Amino acid sequence: MNNRLYKYYPEDFGELKVDVLHMDLTFDIYDDRTNVKSVLRVRTKDEPIEKLELNCKDLEIRAVSCFQSEVSYRYRKDDAILEISFRDLIPPNTEIAVITDTVCRPTKNILEGLYYDETPAGAPPQQITQCQQWGFQRIVPCIDDMTAKCTYRTTIIADSRYTNLITNGDVAVERHTVKPGRDKIVYDNSVTPMATYLFFLGVGTYAAFKREFEYPDGSTFMLELLVPPDSDARAAEKALDILHDCVMWVYVFTGPEQYDEDRLAIRQLMWDLVRRREKLKIEAKPRPGQGEDELGGDGQVGKREGQGERAGEGKGERAGEGEGEGERAGEGERAGEGERAGEGQELRKIRDELSRLDRNITPGYRYTGTVYREIGMQNSDFGGMENVGNTTITTNRIMPFPQITDPAFEYMIRVKVHEYYHNQNGSEVTGRSPFEIWLNEAVTVHIEEQYHAFLFGEDYQRLQRVLDLLAPASGTFALDSGAASMPIIPDGFNDPNDLITAVTYVKSPEYVRMVESLTGKDTFVRGLDRYFKKFQHSNASTQDWIEAMEEESGVALKEISETWLRQTKFPVVEVSAEYDKLTGKFTFFLKQHFPAGGKPWEFPFRAALVDESGKDIVEVLERVSGETAEILIENVGMPSFLSLNRGYSFYGKLVYRASQEELLMQVRKDSDIVGRFTAFYTFVDREKLRLLRVPGSAPSEDFIELYYRLLNDRQLLERAGGQFLTIFESVEDEEFAHHYQALYDVKQKLLKAVAGKYRSSLISAYNFFENASVPRDGSLEETARVIKSRQAKNICLGVLATLDAPDIHALIKQQFETATCTTDRLSAFAAYLNSSAPDKIEVLRAFEAESKKNLIAWEAFLSVIGSNSSVDAVELVREMERSDAFRIEQTNDQRALYGSFARNRKKSLETEEGRVLFAEVLRKLAPVNEYTTVNLLNAFANIDQMEIKYHIPLVKILADLLAELDPQKYPSVYNRIRKLLLGAPAAVEAYGIVQGKIPALQT
Ligand SMILES: [Zn+2]
């Protein structure tokens, strides 16, 4: 046993010995196996080579040869390396072709390489790939490295019954039948040399929906959606509308000049004209999906991949790109068909206008392929994956199914724009190694957030992010300060999936946002543009990105970046202030706490002095460095309150001992939404702490009044959403921060006090928001407004539910029974489940039976069960796992039931029956899915901070698992457990005294 905490370190990712040029792949796909013949062309560098090592995981090797030399080979299975030795030394700068013939076998639970996805009834087995990060070596021997970018030509031969045979690139040879029951298709991917992790292959049975995407200059490509055969056509059309808008928004509203005020009006006009144009186009002809492209009701072949492209506009588009004249003619024809003359004229006018406006802006990314496809994957560790031209998205979030919840709907919009934007940031410009995954993700999330804000409003978007940061258990600060925390660029990792965490997806975008604040928005987007241009079709390192930003801005970023990227946790900044009335001088004093042995962070600090009417006296944005800092503001009047860390300008926490009066004033009057919320958060935090410290004490009138006032601030809730009223089951004080049941009880107590005093006002607020959440039209902006109102309505319901009285049970049940959307239904169900209503078990049974019939509904149902707070919570989880509808190899089931149960720490960690179940779940799940298991384990991130009585039982769960698990087979789970135990030295010591030392922790 060695003492390494990680399997991989940066030195494992050196320069490649050869340049990878091209892969010629032939996939002969059968139900239980796939034969892969590969011709891998590489060129030696300045050194001769006698050996070549290819990554090769769990493959059967049938033959290995080389055009240029006799070879022998050795398959080092445990290292996942195919070692090829050449009889003759291969000279420097020489191209060789290595031919391999191998077999891979898909499984249902290893969701990497080629695997089985959900198969529609009566269809041949659905098979898809997932290559991020090292799935490609499970498919074919290769150099599985982010810098091994090459072109591909891929042939697929498979069962003729599949509706779609897909891989990256454009169709080179149309699909045709080679022998009875077997079809063949060839793709060419030579426009964008592609890293191996972006490879995609899928053979499956889908319903295909298409939509033409037309740029303002008239060039087009095809948007395609592949979803389960029985999918609702209207939902699919809506999904394509949403995707269309994402792609158009990236083009019109991003890019190096996106903040140019003078051109903003042009961009907005283009956006409006495009909407008008699309409306006219749709009115002019039957929408695809309702006409020729739709599948028959039996779910069998409507149209096949390749054939569809031939019959459709695929080839024409490509030829048309960049040749304005040719396209125009094509459009003329389209417009002429079945369209009234007047409309045709209007369409032409809009197109001319768009084309003229287009020449006046510098747009954002423009797609380079002929088809951009989104493919539903039912079973996946990830929500989405950008496989160049073939984005996969978890099926339950790919389109606005009637069963989709509001958060899932928002996720759907975000994942679509996110994966699409990866075309530029990630696929064209790729990080150099897994240590640069953050680079692919941070800017992509940053853009995704801009789009979310474009639809939902800046305030709502930013507040949602702040809630992500602060949430207990699943929140970013919780993860980043717990025992499982890793820096954005870690020292090492066990599996690249270890890097797919909130640190990569939330903390690193926050770092990027700080860089944006320090350089200025205008400069930031120009810097990005410089970076994209410089590294197009190649790989970039962290330093490359920082240097591009420095060159553009002249702002020094290396040092600040080093701390943010390499150090875990975040600054906790204590702020105090002084005001000299005589001189009008105001001074902020900042003192930051940072980890022992670490360095202080450097960050942008935005703050304002505000008067009693809520007007800013002055706002400052300062770059703060060093352990202590002073910010002096001269010639100002005395502020009534301070608005600190505005817009959450830095990633960290702030401690300022404002008086209760100041906080109350800030909650009501600050013009900055984050300021308002953090004041509320602090006020409530103090209230919770007081209740925890003094058992039996009652919530204060100040709190009750404040909460009631906010609930009646319609303007606030319409802007920021009901989420503004979030009260977490958490408290900042370390003494009580991990007393989960007590924290739950305190929250209930607070809400019950509000409900007790304002029962009837709450019911009228409930009715108000109920009316406000009826949509007036089908636009996305309207959907955004409705989602915010619905949040407020369900907050009212949740507060009322704490009364646990018969009339409230009736109200909840009424919402449950009459709800027209899933979020309302689930909110009511969750409230009912936690109540003492006599018929709750009957309601549960009926809802269970209904939810089982649909995978999306089932996922949502399971997650309510996993997080429920009733006395029989653990038994309910057990019951659902025994259900015939629960499938442990399905990640949605794992995440929904086990994930929410793990985070339900008052049950999973603080009760005996919960711990027994949790231990069983971990033991069962580790061999099925390591990634989900590791995520569940994060519930143990704070053992030492929990009450002492839990220390030994919790360490025992982890120690027992360590003793059972094979570290070679399950390195991520094994090493995560060790990391968690090393992060809980007090509990481990207490355990050691009673049970003996844990062997796996000894060196
Ligand atoms: Zn991503």
Image (tube, rainbow, N blue to C red):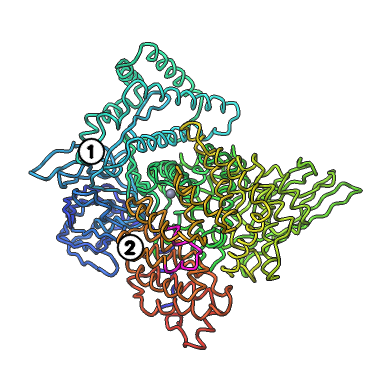
Quadrant hosting residue 731: bottom right
Q: Disc 1 residue type? A: Gly
Number of other residues with Cα within 10 Å of mark 1, as a class: few under 14, some 14 to 19, many 20 or more? few
- Measured as percent of width and height from the top left, residue 698 is found at 70, 64
Tell whether label 2 touches label 1 (CB within 8 Å). no
Q: Residue most toward the right?
A: 582
Relative to 406, does residue 777 appear above or below in the rendering?
above
- Which is nearer the eye, 742 or 987? 742
124 to the left or right of 447: left
The magenta span reads: 863-875
Relative to 613, does residue 541 appear above or below in the rendering?
below
Q: Which residue is mark 1?
A: 297
- Measured as percent of width and height from the top left, residue 429 is found at 42, 45
Query: Under 8 Å from ligand 1: the CB of mark 2?
Result: no
Rendered image: mark on residue 853 = none
- Measured as percent of width and height from the top left, residue 903 is found at 49, 64
Q: Residue most toward the top?
A: 341
Q: Secondary structure at mark 2?
A: loop
Quadrant hosting residue 178: top left
What residue do we see at 37% from left, 48% from top? 396
- Which is nearer the eye, 610 or 680? 680
Number of other residues with Cα within 10 Å of mark 2, as a class: few under 14, some 14 to 19, many 20 or more? few
Q: Which residue is mark 2?
A: 883
What residue do we see at 29% from left, 48% from top? 200
